[in-house]
Image (cartoon, rainbow, N blue to C red):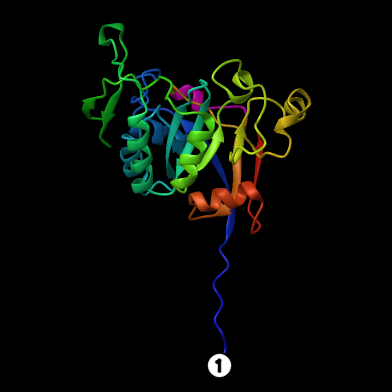
Amino acid sequence: MSVGCSPVPMLKWIKADLHIHTVLSACADLDMSPREIINTAKLLGIGLLAITDHHAIDNVAACREVAKGTGITVLFGMEVQTREEVHLVCLFPSEDLADSFAALVAQHLPSNWLSLGAGEIQAVVTANDQVVRLDQRKLLASLDLSVEDVCGAVARHQGLTIAAHVDRPQYSLLANLGFVPPELPVAALETISDAAALHKKHPSTVGYPLLCSSDAHCLPMLNKEKYTYFYVAEDVTLSEIRMALKGEGGRKVRIEN
């Protein structure tokens, strides 16, 4: 009797952007609605994206609904600001785990409220871009959790942490801590620099996979000179992304024009 083997998945290159804000981020333009984001991604050939609003995941489901049938995969994500004012992109394999992490984050947000008269809007919307409610919490604020605390919590929720825009002069791991702590469980570094230049200036970044994402706050920002490409199974999941970052099972990642 022959023993059956699991089929080997077909791998393909997928253009990705793992750092995108919607109208739920006060710093994002009002054109960053689910329909506009997905339509723009489709025009640009982006097949994988992560919605990463500040300290909230409420608009991810709407973006995923819009993406159905387009061939675009939308991951559950969030951008977190730690006690040290370091920004981390946190990605999760399921809505339940993302919800659980969001509930934890909410417990550690300061009890500040937006000044709506200042024009700050944080809108939770449907797949048809209808406003469900306005979130009046000041989401763009530092949690009372350290970088280590956040990375640990993400790991407990089976997620993946990416150090956001590490080479920017503010709200970054390198600007605020000065180096990448060797034991910090970050899966990759998001950079706007050439790899050689980054490694020369910051030796602690050597050995980490590098990603290029838009951190888009308006639609034109989705159109970049360089993108991240993942060589993964067509039915891409967070597990596939994790494997690509580790170079496992033939999966890989690269940045190119």
Question: Where is the N terminus found, in terms of image quarters?
Answer: bottom right
Q: Residue at 54%, 34% (x, y): give it.
A: 148
Q: Is residue 18 visible in the rendered structure shown here? A: no
- Check disc 1 and report the residue beneath it: 1
Q: Is residue 110 magenta?
A: no
Q: Quadrant of the C terminus?
A: top right
Quarter of the image for residue 40 reads: top left
Q: In the figure, residue 123 lies in which quadrant?
A: top left
Query: Who is closer to the viewer here, 31 or 23?
Result: 23
Q: Residue at x 29, y 14 (%)?
A: 114
Where 249 falls versus 195 (above or below)?
A: below
Q: Position of residue 41 (x, y in %)?
A: 46, 35
| Residue 178: x %, y % from top left | 66, 21
- The amino acid type of the residue labelled 1 equals Met
Where residue 47 appears, as percent x and y from the top left, is 49, 43
Judged from this view, the residue extending furthest toward the bottom is 1
Mark 1 Cα shell of 10 Å, populated few (<14), some (14-19), many (≥20): few
Relative height, residue 41 to residue 237 (above, below):
above
Viewer-nearest residue: 250 or 103: 103
Relative height, residue 184 to residue 81 (above, below): below
Viewed as shown, does residue 9 lie left or right of 77? right
Q: Read off the magenta span.
A: 219-225
Q: Residue at 62% x, 19% y: name it.
A: 175
* Residue 57, image x, y percentages: 35, 35
Q: Residue at x 70, y 32 (%)?
A: 205
Q: Nearer the viewer, residue 156 or 50?
A: 156
| Left or right: 84 as drawn, with respect to 204 | left
